[in-house]
Amino acid sequence: MSHDPLDLQAIDYVEFYVGNARQAAHFYRATLGLQPIAYAGLETGVRDRASYVLQRRNVRFVLSAPLRPDPTHPIAQHIARHGDGVKDIALRVADAAAAYAEALRRGARGVQPPTVLEDAHGRVVKASIATYGDTIHSFVERDGYEGPFMPGYRRIENPAPAPETGIAAIDHIVGNVELGKMNEWVAFYARILGFEQLLHFDDQDISTEYSALMSKVMADGSGKIKFPINEPAEGRKKSQIDEYLEFYGGPGAQHIALASADIIASVDALCAAGISFLRVPDSYYDELPARVGPIKEDLRALAQRGILVDRDDEGYLLQIFSQPLQDRPTVFLEIIQRRGSRSFGKGNFKALFEALEREQALRGNL
């Protein structure tokens, strides 16, 4: 099998369906430091929705909300079921029509056939397929497009300033699926997108006294696009995956990991902007030197911020996880800095899971 049958290039954008796009755009600008660059809505001839595009370096979010009180509108239906959440994890491709045709040939379910969008700035081709839950993957062919985002959007002039948080790229996006469905979706990414399995974590790797989960990490041939797939495992109490599935109303994107070249500076900036992070017990840092060996960062600085560290045979990584970004305990963020490691912090799973369980207990959901 070809490692890249669809000629995938990168994650082009992540689109969230939200209740109020203007307010969500303010939140993501003010807290994450994403800069508003483009808008579509009534003023641009779009009658049913408003969309704001925010970007910083290689991170691009699209926030879309319905404009009318129509319960049959697809965005309104998505919000009613899931709350604010990820609808589209869009993938940049060299040829959207060819990628769509090949995906369907391999068994994908089509959502939007190849559609050509054109304006004075050039041409974009977009097509979409279904993945877990109500989530989709769009294939986006930019073909030298020079506008702010894509046809139908206008540039946002003189946007409000955004803080510098050091966010540079999307490292990975984690999907949560129902018990017994992980291998089905692992097979989907292998068969449809030509992904390969990088890692496998079972309930012995990711468990506490009360709950557990299983996870497999799928990646494209280049390793640039990484999608861990989680499912709950049997436990004495409800796991974080069960809580997510209950409050999200089914499978969906659980968290987006954002890469930083200086996680300490990023966490300081994000905390100052209002992002709250999970904390692990101080004892975690007492055991850290023996577990991970020497690192460049000051251990006290990491402990003060709650940053986790793990090592594999290629290096180490630093990571931290946010509280949920919305009222429902569903989508959250990870901030990650890699110093050689290509893993996902297996040594931190127990401490992280226990921290999540403490939050679940406060919500009455453990």
Image: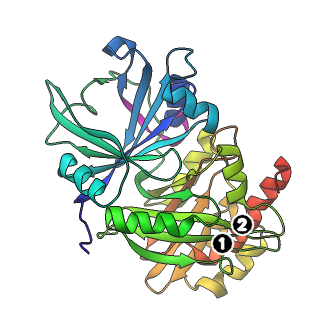
Query: Is residue 34 highlighted in magenta?
Result: yes
Query: Is residue 242 highlighted in magenta?
Result: no
The image's mark for residue 349 is 1
Where residue 323 appears, as percent x and y from the top left, is 67, 49
Residue 49 lies, with reference to residue 53, above or below; the image says above
Residue 68 lies, with reference to residue 127, above or below; the image says above
Q: How is the image coloured?
A: rainbow
**Residue found 78% across the figure and 54% down from its top:** 359
Where residue 58 appears, as percent x and y from the top left, is 34, 49
Viewer-proximal residue among 217 and 34:
217
Q: Magenta segment, which residues?
A: 30-37
Quadrant housing residue 294: bottom right
**Residue found 39% across the figure and 12% down from its top:** 42
Residue 341 in view in this figure: no
The local crowd at label 2, few if under 14, some if 14 to 19, many if 20 or more residues have their Cα within 10 Å, is many
| 150 left or right, relative to 28 | left
Q: Give the amino acid type for the residue marked by disc 1 in the picture.
A: Phe
Where residue 117 appears, as percent x and y from the top left, is 21, 30
Q: Are marks 1 and 2 in contact (CB under 8 Å)?
A: yes
